[in-house]
Image (cartoon, grey):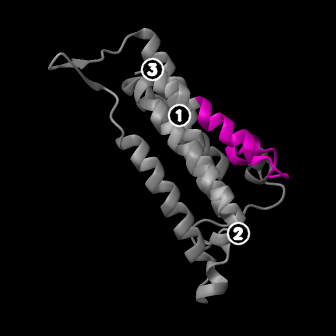
């Protein structure tokens, strides 16, 4: 059985390779989408977690709705096109160079960490609703000890009072970076 922390870092590594190939200009909209998606889920947490009480369904439905919203937002970030700009009636194609590739590697790794870590966080707060396939880690396992390396926990300071503000500031900074890269 693979630890969830290992799966998160493996996803970050694979996304870093994809980011190296895509370049940093294509990875910044994904970072914006992942940060805003996590911020939106934190802000709507009380409403989304009331779904089982309102519908009579289990926690699985809450997890499916949360991961569906987050997945849709990240999908829209990946679908955002920044490579095709039109200038004087012709298409300008960006070519990857060393700096764009290495920054793409960094941003892609961060995106993989954000996406996999947020999915892991959603499983954790919903008490691992995919229990036959993904079970809650024991208290002394590496996954339980690495929960503090989760992006939502790190970027919000453990979800203390008013802590999602830092997540919003990070999303706005990534948005400014994406806007200035055009």
* Residue for point 83% across, 59% down: 139
Instruction: Count neighbours of disc 1 (C-alpha within 10 A) and say few if under 14, some if 14 to 19, many if 20 or more.
Output: many
| Front-most of residues 61 and 1 | 61
Residue 151 part of the magenta segment: yes
Query: For numbered disc 3, what is the local secondary structure?
Result: loop
Whether residue 3 can be seen here: no
Q: In which quarter of the image is the C terminus?
A: top left
Q: Distance between the residues labelled 1 and 3?
A: 24 Å
Instruction: Please state the total of marks drawn on the protein image.
Output: 3
Disc number lying in front (1 or 3): 3
> How far across and down, in percent of the image, does residue 104 sit?
47, 23
* Residue for point 63% across, 86% down: 54
The residue where tag 3 is placed is: 181
Q: How far apart are marks 2 and 3 (CA)?
A: 36 Å
Instruction: Count neighbours of disc 2 (C-alpha within 10 A) and say few if under 14, some if 14 to 19, many if 20 or more.
Output: few
| Front-most of residues 97 and 55 | 55
Disc number placed over residue 13 in the picture, else none: 1
> How far across and down, in percent of the image, does residue 28 sit?
48, 30
> How far across and down, in percent of the image, does residue 131 sit?
62, 72
Q: Earlier in the sequence, mark 1 or mark 3?
A: 1
Query: For numbered disc 1, what is the local secondary structure?
Result: helix
Q: In which quarter of the image is residue 134?
A: bottom right
Whether residue 73 can be seen here: yes
| Front-most of residues 107 and 120 | 107
Q: Earlier in the sequence, mark 2 or mark 1?
A: 1
- The magenta span reads 149-173
Q: Disc 2, disc 1: CB below 8 Å?
A: no
**Which secondary structure type mostly characterizes the magenta part of the structure?**
helix
Query: For numbered disc 2, what is the local secondary structure?
Result: helix
Q: In this view, does 142 lie above or below 93?
A: below
* Residue for point 68% across, 69% down: 126
Disc number placed over residue 46 in the picture, else none: 2
């Amino acid at each position: 059985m693979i630890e969830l922390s290992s799966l998160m870092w493996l996803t970050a590594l694979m996304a870093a390779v994809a980011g190296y190939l895509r370049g940093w200009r294509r990875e910044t909209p994904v970072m914006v989408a992942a940060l805003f998606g996590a911020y939106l889920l934190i802000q709507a947490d009380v409403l989304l977690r009331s779904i089982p009480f309102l519908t009579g369904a289990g926690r699985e439905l809450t997890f499916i709705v949360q991961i569906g919203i987050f997945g849709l937002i990240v999908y829209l970030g990946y679908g955002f096109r920044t490579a095709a700009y039109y200038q004087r009636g012709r298409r300008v194609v960006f070519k990857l160079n060393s700096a764009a590739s290495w920054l793409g590697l960094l941003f892609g790794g961060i995106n993989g960490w954000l996406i996999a870590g947020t999915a892991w966080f959603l499983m954790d707060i919903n008490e691992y609703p995919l229990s036959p396939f993904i079970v809650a880690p024991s208290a002394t396992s590496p996954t339980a000890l690495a929960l503090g390396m989760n992006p939502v926990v790190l970027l919000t300071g453990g979800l203390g009072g008013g802590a999602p503000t830092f997540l919003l500031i990070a999303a706005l900074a990534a948005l400014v970076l994406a806007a200035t890269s055009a």
